[in-house]
Image: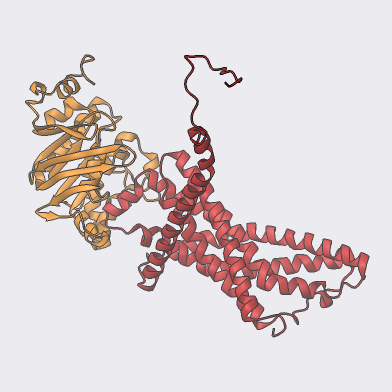
Chain colours: A red, B orange
Amino acid sequence: MSRTRDIRSADSPPAPPASAPDPQRVALLLRPPLLVGAAALGGARVARGIASLFAGTLLRAINRQSERGAVAEQMFNIGNRSLFFVAVTLGFIALVSVFQVCLQLNRVTGDLSKVGLELIKLMVHESAPSLTAMMLATRVGAGIAAEIGSMVVTEQVDALRMSGVDPVSYLILPRFLACLLMTPVLAVFAFGVALGSGTAMAYVAFGVNPSIFVDFSAVTAADVGIGVVKCFCFGAAIPVVSGYCGLTTFGGSEGVGAATTRAVINASLAVLALDLLLTVAGFMLFPPSAA
Amino acid sequence: MIRFSRVSKAFRDPLLVDVDLDIESGAIWGLIGPGAGGKSVLLKIAAGLMRPDAGRVEIAGRDITGDDETALAQTRERIGMLFQNNALFDFMTVLDNVAFPLRRRGVADDEAEARAEKRLRAVGLAGSEHKMPSELSGGMQKRVGLARASVADPEVVIYDEPTAGLDPVTTSKIYDLLREDHEASKPTTIVVSSDVDALLSFAPRVALLEGGVLRYDGDAAAIAESDDAVVRQFVTGSLEGPL
């Protein structure tokens, strides 16, 4: 006879068998993978939408479906109106970078003759295109998403379609072409400002002669090529990504705000991802030893 | 003729459920119903701005349900639409807003402007041609929207809430304009309005959508005697009933 005593009262519910899983625990365990899955599906849907919009925009560009005068207007909006912002940002970044590098080198070797050489090489293939594009992703990307998004929520995009207008040709294509053309121009301008401010900092704070600082001898054709390709790729990505965010806006002013935020984040991420891809591709095509 | 055959549409919730509706060419149709009943969705499907999840939409005997964007754009050229919030292009002047559909249809600039000016005079907005939409009152913006919807002499005109937010006098003026437009070129006219009394006196035939379901489709004069308690309550505005 067993000595153990059943502590359960007669009317308490029977305990579940040891093998039966607790539904609440199962739901809790499944929640993270389900959330990850939903996010992945959402991301894939957005990526497909952006790829489709990019292909459609490119097709319309080839068929020359852009509005007369619209590209020039957008070039002014995207290019001229970004000049100050890009100049200030790149100028300050160059000032700080040169100051820090010179400060550290002074402590270690004291030889500052190669600072300009390395800064220029880095600026040509990396900093000028990518930092200019990041600035454009915030200023231009936000503007495009807000403008198109507010047109969507006020039914102006539907009104365009009722008037026989293709919204991609009318709204996306001019911005795409303008950004494609103006990003390299702005990057060259930004490079000039950064070079000027870096040279000034090196001369004023560390006494480096500008004729020594401004040294292009390390810049190769590959550096210039990679820089130019990056500019065009960033210039193509920013308006398409932010235009997609604008066209998929829903809700009222809150929706426009969300679309603008989404546009800045997605366009910046697109620039960073493209930068990594193009840098790796450039490294593989033109290894440093061959350059 | 515009024919909706078992048209359904849903986002999260069903917006239209198996809607069957025939609208004769040249007729004036009123579309009424409680908010979020599917009226605007039905209009957008008729205009080719939205695709139904199921069912068929025919315009002048042609099924547009499976049309691609190019074919839909051609269909839209035969349709004019006044949007609920007017949807005026805020970066264009009043004149450019009205001339825009004409220019897009290939009408020469001079002719487009002349026709737009004539249309603006007809809606009582002579002298406002060079103002921006933001400089106009709600009623004036509505009239610009009306002018733009009908400037290209479309075969079908869709008015989504043409009198929303307007005072009774402006409402009467707007309905007079709609009547004059219809008498001038006899387009098939579909009007959605929350102003049931004004709409019932304007449209000889009406349909009532409630929760995406077509509850009434028939004479405007007989709607108050409908067998459906929902329809009767909505039309009479009674507080007692299923709504």
Of residues B241 and A228, the one drawn nearer to the viewer in this rendering: B241
**Left or right: A174 as drawn, with respect to A87:** left
> Can residue B188 be seen at all in this image of the molecule?
yes
Could you tell me residue A209's position as x and y percent? 86, 74
User: Residue A271's quadrant in the figure?
Assistant: bottom right
Please name the residue shown 41% across and 44% down the image. Answer: A250
**Left or right: A193 as drawn, with respect to B130:** right
The N terminus of chain A, quarter of image: top right
The C terminus of chain A, quarter of image: bottom right
Please name the residue shown 49% across and 52% down the image. Answer: A40
Q: Is residue B72 above or below residue A24?
A: below
Of residues A19 and B121, the one drawn nearer to the viewer in this rendering: A19
Q: How many marks?
A: 0
> Can residue B120 be seen at all in this image of the molecule?
no
Could you tell me residue B147's position as x and y percent? 24, 45
Q: Work out which residue is located at the far bottom of the displayed protein and give it.
A: A290
Could you tell me residue A275's position as x and y percent? 61, 66
User: Residue A214's quadrant in the figure?
Assistant: bottom right
Please name the residue shown 72% across and 61% down the image. Answer: A91
**Left or right: A49 as drawn, with respect to A199:** left
Q: Is residue A217 above or below residue A26?
A: below
Q: Work out which residue is located at the far front of the displayed protein and give it.
A: A1
Please name the residue shown 75% across and 68% down the image. Answer: A196
Q: Is residue A65 above or below residue B99?
A: below
Could you tell me residue A160's position as x and y percent? 32, 53
